[in-house]
Amino acid sequence: MTPPLTSPSPTLSRHRISLFNKIQQLLFSAQAWIGVVWLLALLIALPILVILGQILTNSSTTWQHLAETVLKDYVLNSFWLMIGVGLGVTVIGVGTAWLVTMCEFWGSRAWSWLLLLPFAAPAYILAYTYTVFLSFEGPVQSGLRAWTGWEWGDYWFPEIRSLPGAILMLTLVLYPYVYLLARVAFLEQATCTLEASRSLGCGPWRSFWTVALPLARPAIAAGVALALMETLNDFGTVQYFGVDTFTTGIYRTWLGLGDRTGAAQLASVLLLFIFGLLLAERWSRGQARFTKQGHSAPLRPYSLKTWRAGLATLFCFLPVGLGFIAPATVLLQMAIREGAGAWNEEFWTHASHSLILSGLAALLAVILGVFLAYGLRLFPAWSLRLGTQLAVMGYAIPGAVIAVGILVPLGWVDNQIDRFAVATFNISTGLVLSGTIFALLYAYLVRFLAVSFNSVEASLLKIRPSLDEAARSLGKTAVGTLISVHLPLMTTGLLTAAMMVFVDVMKELPATLVIRPFNFDTLAIQVYRLASDERLNEAAGGALAIVLVGLIPVLWLSWQIHRAGPQHVTK
């Protein structure tokens, strides 16, 4: 006979439960949470601190050479890029946001989400496609010669691979930052304020300039700051168009000249631009002291007729047509022309690398985002909030700067490990951390943790604190409340965070280009490499795949905007 099954004694079970509860209380105490958050914050901030520390180091001979030759070009080109892109995204973003929010014309509801489509395509892909589209052999100049009978040298045509061309490409893909924030600001403005301006005889144009625009200024400034940070982060567009900026200089100094110190010092100067943008944005936000939000009644739109409606439709169509429809059409034609070669074995290898990196980065970013946001919910102390803000500040830092800031300390750690292994075991370990997937994921988390955290925190704030109290009264611990109550209610926010990080990593070029492991290229690297070799038809498959993946969050966001569109009063 088999012995009867015996259950553990009640005393032993209570002892285990008590021990588990003590461990859980220790791990989820305020002190432990604050300590872990600050450790995470220091790890995230380490690349930035390393770069800032380079300002205090002695200048290398390479840096002196750069300062005497090309540093002035880096500064001027970066400055003019910021001026041009800033003006472009402001005009397009604010203008289209006002039209689709406060005016009624043909297709105004559809334009409200179609205007987000250029978000799907990175600027460097637009640069490659417009080079083909506007080249001497391209359809535009070929059609012009066929129509006029002109030959080479008989006419002047603007050169797309130039500083104005780079400004145009970046403007077309970055204006949605301003459009989104400006549209939200217009929707949240008090209806009574706008109605008061109308009762005083203000027309659409005057109401826009004297009432709506001043109230929306902080949101517009935030959108422009985001667009300019992405402008300074760009590498593929400016490199392909031959525009020397800080990102191209960092890449050349690091990989071309092999000088890490010179590259880090260039990165430190670029950080000064970033901090200047952040201070300007904060200053603009601090000036908004009389903004009134929340409308109590439906909006009464300005009805545009005849030629005004036509101009409004054209103004909304141009950024969508130039920023998405035209490049997507060119990419599709090139991919069809290339045939099976556009999706060969090399494409699928690079696609699998992109999926692996994007999936891992999205998973880690969501986990860390939940940890940071839930910590603020449990312990809303100023020290925890400060540590959290430090941990999510990396989104403002260009990928090239983060790459240099990561490889410098990781290289030092690798050298120490190698020295120890040689001295102890007479074995050289080589590079253990630098140029690995670990380093690449580290860079992605530094850059995109803020994207995940903001989405998770927004979802968590929508859950009433009374649900936490109810769960605790039923015996749920902090972890149990998170798992059984919060996470199911945050499904949409978690999916949005994962989706946004996934797509951002898929499109990321500067950090991937510098840190990627040997023979571990992604789709973005493949497109960049083929385009640099003027093999644009072969790059079409990878570029089209990146655009299609980028459409996922755009369509999701468009659907959300379409559902929550402005409720207009019909006349």
Image: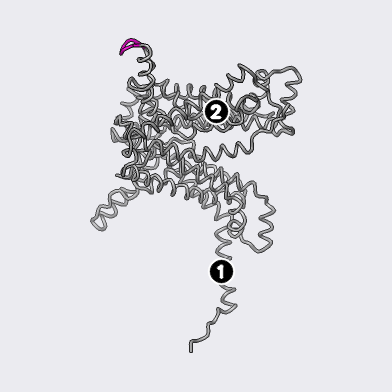
120 with respect to 288 (left or right): left
* 168, above or below 544, in the image: above
Residue that carries the numbered disc 2 in the rendered image? 280
Relative to the observer, which residue lies in front, 425 or 330?
330
Q: Give the extent of the magenta segment.
A: 149-155
Please, what is the three-letter code of the amino acid marked with disc 1? Leu
Please, what is the three-letter code of the amino acid marked with disc 2? Ala
Relative to the observer, which residue lies in front, 380 or 305?
305
User: Which of the labelled discs sits on residue 7, or is there none?
Assistant: none
Residue that carries the numbered disc 1 in the rendered image? 19
The answer, for residue 209, to whether it is visible in the render is: yes
Picture quadrant where residue 162 is located: top left
Mark earlier in primary sequence (1, 2): 1
In the rendering, at what x and y percent does residue 549 appear? 45, 40
Residue 257 belongs to the span the image colors magenta:
no
Answer few, some or many: residues within 10 Å of disc 1's Cα (few below 14, many 20 plus, some between 14 and 19). Answer: few
In the rendering, at what x and y percent does residue 121 appear? 45, 33
